Image (cartoon, coloured by chain):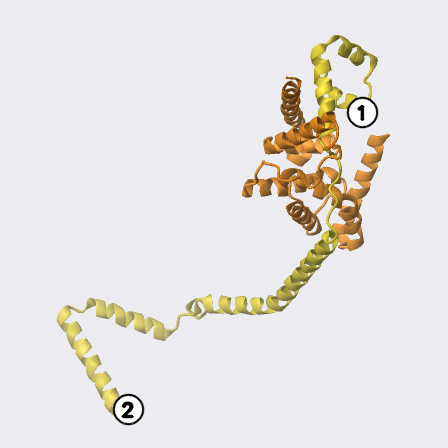
Amino acid sequence: MHLTDEQLMRRVEGPLDAEAEAHLKGCAQCRAAAEETAAIWRHLPSELVEPSPGFDARLRARLDAEDERRQAGWFRWAWAAPSFAAALGLILVLATPASSERPVDDGDLQMLAELELLDDLDAAELVDVYSDLELIESLDGEEG
Amino acid sequence: MLKEAVEGADAEEAQWMAEFVRTRDRVLFERLFDRYRRRMVTYAYKFVRRRDRAEELAQDVFIRVYTCKTYRPDAPFRAWLYQVATRVCLNEVRRREYSVKLEALDREPADSVGPDGALEGAQLSQRLMQRLAELPEKQRAAFVMCRFEGLSHEEISKALEVSISSTKSLIHRALEALRAEVRSHQEMTCT
């Protein structure tokens, strides 16, 4: 059984247990892998990159901007909420059909009856009715 | 012992983070920032290999931490932070065309001049960095977290949002590629 990646990586830091070390002595393939892994560890620089001097200040400025944006968001909401509620209320009032609130009265029934009567008239009689209506409208216009 | 210390620090950081999200006390955020500012710049640098861009990405990571709205106190902080950082960095390298050709490195290895052996060492160092930069994104991220950040397989799997067996496979393939680079370099210098 060859050494695992974990064992090869751990061996860079120090010897493994006796069994693994014994295997390593007798296995050229694992020895080569261990040496190559050690070379990778040696030659890939692991130092941390030091941020430039302005790094902290730049971040704090961005944090301040975030705080301002958050506060501005709350302010806008606090200002807009009552206006939004009023607008919503108005829309609801306007959108509600008035006829559904008003009970049907005698006038409505009479108008419906007249409309049904109009349906029963033939074309010639309808012409007469419309002529009468136009005459009444022209009289209204003269009176005005 | 070291593992216990790391786990203890992780639990403490998770509590700071949860408390920060609840109270918005910037002192708690600053503690986390102080601990990870260099690590985040270094981590981002491994993806973009430009210090200025690495700093911007590290700042993006901290802004995401700062604006986080929910955090469970029992969530492991380090794995979560690297998950955020990995998302930011992978998003960046997918969005922009980053040349894998290494520009003049910020800092040449200290032994880049001198005896032949040291020069060879510097050349191998360059080749390995180049190869690392060419690795597929998740292989690179897994290897960097393992080699440079000292994260466990479990933490890496959480950060990359993959299974532990996939994490091991990613690290294995990255190691294989880098070992092949070492072999190639040795063959070249032996002839």
Taking the image as shown, residue B155 lies to the left or right of residue B96, namely right
Q: Which chain is yellow?
A: A
Residue pointed to by mark 2: A144
Camera sees residue B154: no
- Decide: is B183 above or below A25: below
The one nearer the camera, B154 or A143, is B154
- Decide: is B159 above or below B25: above
Residue pointed to by mark 1: A13
Whether label 1 touches label 2, CB < 8 Å: no
Q: Position of residue B80 (x, y in %)?
A: 70, 40
Q: Position of residue B66 (x, y in %)?
A: 71, 51
The nearer-to-camera label among 1 and 2 is: 1
Q: Colour of chain B?
A: orange
Taking the image as shown, residue B26 lies to the left or right of residue B166, namely right
Camera sees residue A64: yes
Residue positioned most to the right:
B1
Report the chain holding disc 1: A
Alpha carbon distance from label 1 to label 2: 109 Å
